[in-house]
């Protein structure tokens, strides 16, 4: 049976194939441009397609009907590739896909009404829809609505969004090639991958000036990333009705209330093989083979292809991450040299030699480190720890701290130049954030009922009253302060853990024979530090998990006006929290531990119960190094597990639960539907992770020169993990424009300034460098070996009988014990007061901080002044391109004017042409 009927502007085709192999009822319905409803069409599209069916269908056989559909419309679904990214006609590209499950139990009628209204409004806006019935979906439950933006829609919204499009191929000569280019051939990618399209002069698209633009093919003029950006713009502003007296609109709201289950643009092919369709660009396959494989870690990134496929916003992130990784190489090399220097000089370090000496360190009896269950101990028990502390606490530490202060300035300044070059190459020179400022968030428009005139557009816009803003900000600020207080409370709890378990570790190691062989290496101080650092890391990750949800909730509650405001507010909240969360324990060890201890008989107690911690006789720097290593390495390992393994496991589980788990058996939109959503905040978390890492390698780098090397190895992996998950495990994100890394640039600048201060304080107060230098130049009495006697000089004497109550330690044949401080002995008239050497050291520390900060800041500002933000070559190219673009536009206008005036008198034509040429010359002079 076959039937072809025509009703007005609709054409309904219904056929039953009688072939034994196929028994399928197929129905195609072409809906008119006004978007009239139909009952359960399998495929919907904008209307003129039906009228293209040639001739009448009367008298056609079943075979002829099938040929009619497949030959003239491309609707033979049996022959369509499962990997196709086109409508069933094989010509109209799928720019976006919506999916939903029709569940009558969960507000099914209400959701169906919303979908009906929403899809009708999409049709009215000019988009074309095609619905895939659930019977044809892989799980048998999900409907898919495929969306195509025709030429008319694309040209209209390209002008609205001020999208730049090519007008002429760029004829500016390329920059001079690097004479050392041949040395980097191993790291280069093929030119067709690095430069997937020619360089053009561009101008904002104008629908009235289409002849001006370089349009070879309407189907390929707008790239897929531009097309999905335009469609998403329409989807995010399309209304779907009125509920509770408020106008409702936007795909985000429909996704949140379950009307649709997903909305996404399609990948152009499977990532592991090319599509058989010649019209597919196979860019995903190219990105996977040339970029996302780990074995390509030594290759440069195809930034132009990334930008073309994913948009400028994701492209600028990978450009920044790649540049940051390149700069880390130099810091890692210098840090490794400093570490090797410490390793070479470790055996000749006089401090550790004296501590390990049986007749020096073995004869020095130290006071108990806790009030109960702690014994008097010999200084040489910390022999191994003192040796290893020299790896990081040496003269090279000072050099590396100054080097990193200059390195961070070079990194930020050179990134500005790299960013300026990308702005030019990616046509972002005239892109201003104001364009985003003028685009209100749909949530803002929906929740703000009051309106006022916008001073820029002179149009009425919704706004949030000042009183409401103030209340929301107060609540938001109070919430952030509460969570920061929670971090501080957790840090205090970890400090209490340190104080309370130290005695347990000391007793355990003293009494357990199996631990005796490693007691010289694993001291009670080190065991306490390691376990406390691990506990602190676990608390950090738990608090992060909880606060992420709170931060998003309170930012939503503030109702930011634009997407830019939303991201900036969320960024500041998350960064402030994570700054305190990750760095608070490092700040404690670096600047507070061992600084407010008191002395035997007059110790300082926390909450009048727990005695404050003391540093190791070799200093607190080794503990800061331990803390930094555990938190930094733990965060990087856990981050890579989250980014790589969890998405893969999740997608594998979803495919396993489906009826089939082979991607070869279901369609392109279903394959992408099974992937995870990258989300609007996907890049936010990537930036946050890298900025926190940037803090570790700058704020505390004086304590751990190998931190840049760890960061370098992590980032080499990070680039490939991020590219792999984006290419294989996530749906294609909506393309978005960005000309910079945004507010993160200001955060990095702030951390760069703070890093100079923290490293100066670490060298001065946490390391033993300044006390050693003061002893070397002012107090040493041995000219042949100036550092001899330093350990004895740095330890004060305490008379055991002066303890207010005898500690729980057993007394031997000694009456005094030593402790780390500069105080007068018990037989001095200024008993237990600070000696003059203490004040000399303190003055030297303060002088060092001031001198180091001024030197580094002067060099930083000089370097920043010497390096222009925009390279001279790029500045000249921008001016040249603007000049040529203006010339091209004026030539076009002049030609149009001549055509329009062809019927007038020669005198009138000449007069108008002269006037137009005069305007062009004036515009060129002013440009």
Image (cartoon, rainbow, N blue to C red):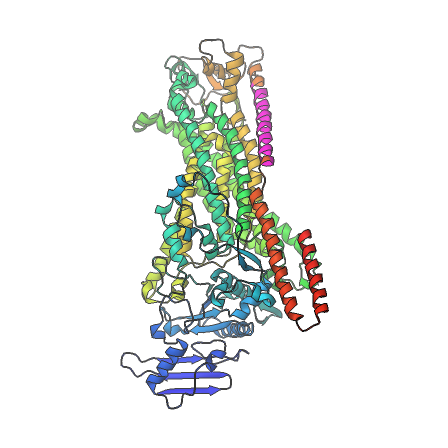
Q: Is residue 662 visible?
A: yes
Measured from the top left, where is residue 873 in percent x and y? 56, 44
Measured from the top left, where is residue 786 in percent x and y? 47, 12
Compare residues 443 and 178 and report the one nearer the observer: 178
- Determine if the magenta segment contains residue 579: no
Task: Please report the bounds of the magenta region as a residue range.
Answer: 841-865
- Determine if the magenta segment contains residue 845: yes
For image coordinates 54% across by 58% down, the residue present is 168
Q: Quadrant of residue 868?
A: top right
Q: Quadrant of residue 659?
A: bottom left
Compare residues 393 and 830 and report the one nearer the observer: 393
Compare residues 841 and 94 and report the one nearer the observer: 94
Q: Residue furthest front?
A: 906
Compare residues 460 and 76 and report the one nearer the observer: 76
Measured from the top left, where is residue 875 in percent x and y? 59, 45
Measured from the top left, where is residue 588 in percent x and y? 51, 33
Q: Quadrant of residue 154?
A: bottom right
- Measured along the vertical axis of the image, is residue 80 above or below residue 350? below
């Amino acid at each position: 049976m076959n039937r072809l009927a025509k009703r007005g502007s609709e054409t309904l085709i219904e056929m039953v194939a009688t072939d034994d192999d196929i028994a399928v009822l197929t129905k195609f319905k072409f809906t008119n441009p006004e978007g009239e409803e139909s009952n359960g069409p399998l495929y919907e599209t904008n209307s003129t397609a039906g009228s293209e069916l040639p001739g009448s269908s009367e008298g056609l056989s079943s075979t002829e009907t099938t040929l009619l559909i497949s030959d003239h419309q491309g609707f033979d679904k049996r022959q369509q590739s499962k990997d196709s990214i086109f409508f069933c006609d094989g010509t109209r590209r799928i720019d976006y896909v919506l999916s939903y499950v029709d569940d009558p139990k969960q507000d099914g009628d209400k959701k169906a009404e919303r979908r009906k209204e929403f899809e009708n409004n999409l049709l009215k806006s000019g988009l074309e829809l095609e619905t895939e019935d659930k019977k044809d979906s892989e799980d048998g439950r999900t409907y898919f609505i495929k969306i195509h933006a025709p030429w008319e829609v694309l040209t209209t919204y390209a002008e609205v969004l001020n999208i730049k499009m090519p007008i002429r191929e760029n004829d500016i000569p390329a920059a001079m090639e690097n004479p050392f280019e041949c040395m980097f051939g191993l790291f280069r990618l093929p030119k067709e991958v690095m430069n997937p399209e020619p360089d053009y002069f561009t101008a904002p698209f104008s629908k009235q000036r289409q002849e001006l633009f370089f349009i070879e093919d309407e189907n390929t003029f707008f790239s897929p990333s531009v097309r999905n950006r335009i469609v998403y713009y329409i989807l995010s502003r399309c209304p779907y009705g009125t509920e509770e007296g408020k106008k409702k609109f936007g795909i985000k709201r429909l996704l949140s209330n379950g009307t649709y289950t997903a909305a996404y643009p399609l990948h152009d092919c499977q990532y592991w093989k090319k599509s058989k369709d010649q019209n597919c660009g196979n860019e995903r396959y190219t990105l996977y083979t040339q970029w996302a494989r780990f074995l390509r870690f030594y290759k440069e990134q195809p930034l132009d292809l990334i930008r073309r496929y994913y948009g400028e916003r994701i492209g600028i992130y990978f450009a920044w991450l790649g540049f940051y990784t390149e700069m880390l190489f130099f810091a890692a090399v210098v840090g490794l040299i400093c570490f090797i220097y410490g390793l070479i000089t470790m055996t000749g370090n006089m401090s550790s030699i004296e501590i390990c000496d049986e007749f020096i360190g073995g004869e020095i009896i130290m006071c108990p480190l806790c009030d109960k269950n702690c014994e008097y101990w010999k200084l040489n028990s910390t022999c191994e720890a003192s040796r290893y502390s020299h790896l990081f606490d040496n003269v090279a530490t000072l050099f590396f701290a100054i080097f990193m202060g200059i390195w961070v300035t070079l990194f930020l300044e050179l990134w500005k130049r790299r960013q300026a070059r990308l702005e030019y190459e990616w046509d972002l020179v005239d892109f201003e954030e104001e364009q985003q400022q003028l685009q209100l968030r749909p949530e803002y428009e929906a929740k703000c009922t009051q309106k006022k005139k916008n001073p820029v557009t002179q149009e009425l816009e919704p706004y949030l009253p000042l009183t409401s803003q103030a209340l929301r900000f107060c609540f938001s600020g109070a919430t952030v302060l509460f969570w920061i207080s929670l971090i501080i409370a957790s840090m205090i709890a970890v400090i209490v853990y340190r104080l309370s378990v130290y005695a347990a570790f000391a007793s355990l190691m003293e009494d357990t024979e199996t631990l005796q062989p490693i007691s010289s290496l694993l001291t009670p101080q080190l065991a306490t530090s390691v376990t406390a650092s691990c506990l602190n890391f676990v608390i950090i990750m738990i608090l992060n998990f909880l606060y992420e949800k709170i931060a998003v909730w309170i930012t939503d509650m503030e109702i930011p006006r634009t997407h830019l405001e939303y991201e900036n507010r969320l960024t500041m909240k998350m960064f402030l929290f994570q700054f305190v969360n990750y760095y608070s324990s490092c700040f404690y060890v670096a600047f507070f531990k061992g600084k407010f201890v008191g002395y035997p008989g007059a110790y300082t107690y926390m909450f009048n119960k727990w005695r404050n911690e003391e540093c190791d006789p070799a200093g607190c720097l080794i503990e800061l190094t331990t803390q930094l290593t555990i938190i930094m390495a733990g965060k990087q390992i856990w981050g890579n597990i989250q980014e790589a393994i969890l998405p893969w496991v999740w997608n594998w589980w979803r495919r396993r639960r489906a009826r089939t788990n082979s991607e070869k058996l279901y369609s392109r939109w279903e394959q992408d539907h099974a992937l995870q959503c990258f989300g609007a905040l996907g890049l936010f978390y990537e930036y946050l992770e890298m900025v926190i890492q940037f803090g570790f390698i700058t704020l505390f780098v004086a304590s751990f020169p190998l931190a840049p090397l760890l960061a370098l190895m992590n980032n080499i992996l990070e680039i490939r993990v991020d590219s792999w998950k984006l290419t294989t495990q996530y749906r294609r994100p909506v393309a978005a424009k960005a000309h910079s890394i945004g507010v993160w640039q200001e955060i990095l600048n702030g951390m760069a300034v703070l890093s100079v201060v923290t490293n100066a304080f670490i060298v001065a107060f946490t390391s033993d460098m300044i006390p050693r230098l003061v002893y070397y130049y002012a107090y040493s009495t041995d000219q042949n070996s100036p550092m001899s006697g330093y350990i004895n000089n740095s330890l004060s004497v305490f008379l055991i009988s002066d303890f207010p109550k005898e500690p729980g330690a057993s007394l031997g044949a000694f009456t005094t014990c030593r402790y780390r401080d500069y105080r007068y002995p018990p037989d001095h008239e200024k008993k237990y007061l600070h000696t003059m050497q203490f004040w000399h050291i303190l003055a030297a520390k303060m002088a060092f901080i001031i001198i180091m900060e001024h030197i580094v800041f002067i060099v930083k500002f000089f370097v920043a002044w010497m390096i222009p933000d925009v390279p001279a070559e790029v500045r000249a190219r921008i001016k040249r391109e603007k000049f040529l673009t203006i010339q091209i536009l004026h030539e076009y206008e002049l030609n149009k004017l001549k055509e329009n005036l062809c019927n007038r008198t020669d005198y009138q034509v000449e007069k108008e042409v002269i006037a137009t040429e005069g305007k062009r010359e004036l515009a060129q002079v002013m440009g």
